[in-house]
Amino acid sequence: MTHHRGQRRALLACLLGLPALSSCTTPAQLLLAVIPDGTLATLLGHFEKEPSANRQRVAELEHKGEWVELAKFAEANLEKDRSSAAWWMVAGYAYTQQKQHARAIQCFREMVRLEPDMADGWNLLAQAYRTVGDPQRAIATVNNALLVLRDSPATLLILGDANSDLQRYEPAVRAYRQALDMDAGLTPAWAGLARSYIKLGRAPEAESIARAVEKSNPPLAAAIRQEIANAVKP
């Protein structure tokens, strides 16, 4: 889908501009970072028991970017079944796209309450807190998630990013490294780890990341080296 490709390009551009990540990443891009398989695929992945007409309608509205209508559609279905975590997720996503972050948070909190073992709910809730400038609550959310989740590199990525928001770079390094131990291909974690090393004045370790990703991701390697150079300028 064209708008997804555009969002992904924007997200990559932000990731490569390491220090500017938090300032240029939009709420929609934060969600894409958490659900890298694609927003629509993730939304529909929770609708196995829903009629095909509902799945089709969600897909149509999401494809067109009709967020108000998507929120209304989700709310109408929630009136029929308040226990559907999937519809709370759709509603939260639609409100996020409308920048109604308080309502999105309420939706994601309900999603987590209903299905506490679902990583998507915890991750979306934590990112929603980061979106409204509350990294402390994002960290608390992720820590709660890690009590019930296993093998969730995206959750650890958020933990690293939220600590980075607070300039807590040592905890951020630990979280990013844990995420990469689970998924070595998680590019945002490599970017966050390099950024944290640079902030800590550990340029050689950031340079080692640049060397490690040089063949697989030349733009990221170049961006890391540029940030190292910027950091050591008098």
Image (tube, rainbow, N blue to C red):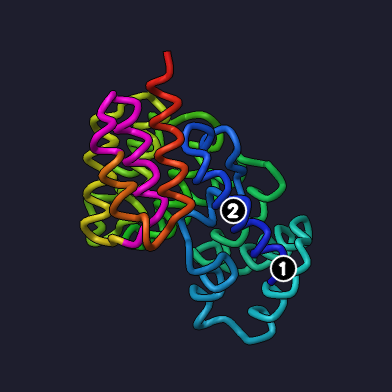
The crowd level at tag 2 (other Cα within 10 Å; few <14, some 14-19, many 20+) is: many
Whether residue 202 appears in magenta in the rendering, the answer is yes
Q: Name the residue under label 2.
A: 92
State which quarter of the image contains the C terminus.
top left
Of the residues under marks 2 and 1, which one precedes in the sequence?
A: 1
State whether residue 54 is above or below residue 114: below
| Marks 2/1: CA–CA distance | 22 Å
The three-letter amino acid code for the residue at tag 1 is Thr
Q: Give the range drawn in magenta.
A: 185-206
Q: Residue at x 34, y 62 (%)?
A: 185
State whether residue 31 is above or below residue 144: below
How many numbered markers are drawn? 2
Q: Residue at x 72, y 47 (%)?
A: 98
Quadrant in the picture for residue 207: top left
Q: Name the residue under label 1.
A: 2
Coordinates of residue 21 in the picture (x, y in percent): 51, 38
Whether residue 189 appears in magenta in the rendering, the answer is yes
Q: Residue at x 50, y 75 (%)?
A: 45
State which quarter of the image contains the N terminus.
bottom right
The three-letter amino acid code for the residue at tag 2 is Gly
Dot 2 falls on a residue whose secondary structure is helix
